[in-house]
Amino acid sequence: MNAKLKYPKILLTVPGVPTPKQSARFGTIKNKFGKFVPIVYKDQKVRIQENNFKASVISEISQKYPGFIPYADCGLSIKLTFVFPPLKTMSKKVLEKISLEKECVYKVTKPDLGDNLKKLTLDAMNGVVYIDDAQICLETARKIYGNVPRTEIEIAVMPDELCYL
């Protein structure tokens, strides 16, 4: 059975404080002829963060969605919620809102959504949840405060009539 039909929507929760993905680093090395050559590399810390996130996603998928195979040949919509721990400087009123979870208290400071937070999340799910993050046609993301830091992910298959492959 096709995963698209078996699981038209999946919900994942990855525990831990959401971490941004740093951009690639640039440097130079000396080659065997003594000339300096430019190189591009990924920091080891970034690789470890991405691998840990991927391992958490694989673990949750195998528990919640047995027999899941990555989505292929379909458009996807994704909803991301990055939940950060409350700040020590927050007022009791704000902390109460956060603990009751009736209202969202949005995080308006770094890390930024676009370049860093979403990049680590989407890249880590390549080949696990979907073949390529290029399949994502619709995306919603937010940063909020909550008592339990985590990343919530909701992925749904887009109707075929809305997507052209």
Image: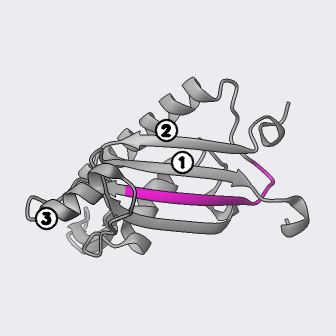
Badge 1 density bin: few <14, some 14–19, many ≥20, Cα 10 Å: many
Give the quadrant of residue 70. top right
The C terminus - image quarter: bottom right
At a point 34% along the width and 73% down the height, the residue shown is 112
Q: Choose between 145 and 95: the one closer to the eye.
A: 95
Q: Residues within 10 Å of mark 2 (few under 14, many from 20)?
A: many
| Label 3 or label 1, whichever comes before in sequence order | 3
Per the image, the residue denoted by label 3 is 90
Name the residue located 74 percent from the left edge and 38 percent from the top edge.
7
Asked if marks 1 and 2 touch (Cβ < 8 Å), the reply is: yes
Which amino acid is tagged 2?
Val
C-alpha distance separating marks 2 and 3: 31 Å
* Residue displayed at 49% across by 66% down: 141
**Stretch of the chain drawn in magenta:** 72-82
- Tell me where residue 34 sits by quadrant: bottom left
Residue 24 located left or right of residue 93: right
Q: Nearer the viewer, mark 3 or mark 1?
A: 3
Q: Which residue is mark 2?
A: 57
Q: Position of residue 40 (x, y in %)?
A: 34, 67
Q: Position of residue 90 (x, y in %)?
A: 13, 64
Tell me the mark number nearer the camera, choosing from 2 and 3.
Answer: 3
Q: Secondary structure at mark 3?
A: loop
- Quick one: label 3, few (<14), some, or many (20+) residues within 10 Å? few
Q: Is residue 61 above or below residue 159?
A: above
Q: Which mark is residue 125?
A: 1
Q: Residue furthest right?
A: 161
Where the N terminus falls, by quadrant?
top right
Question: Is residue 68 shown in magenta?
Answer: no
Residue 42 screen position, x and y as percent:
32, 59
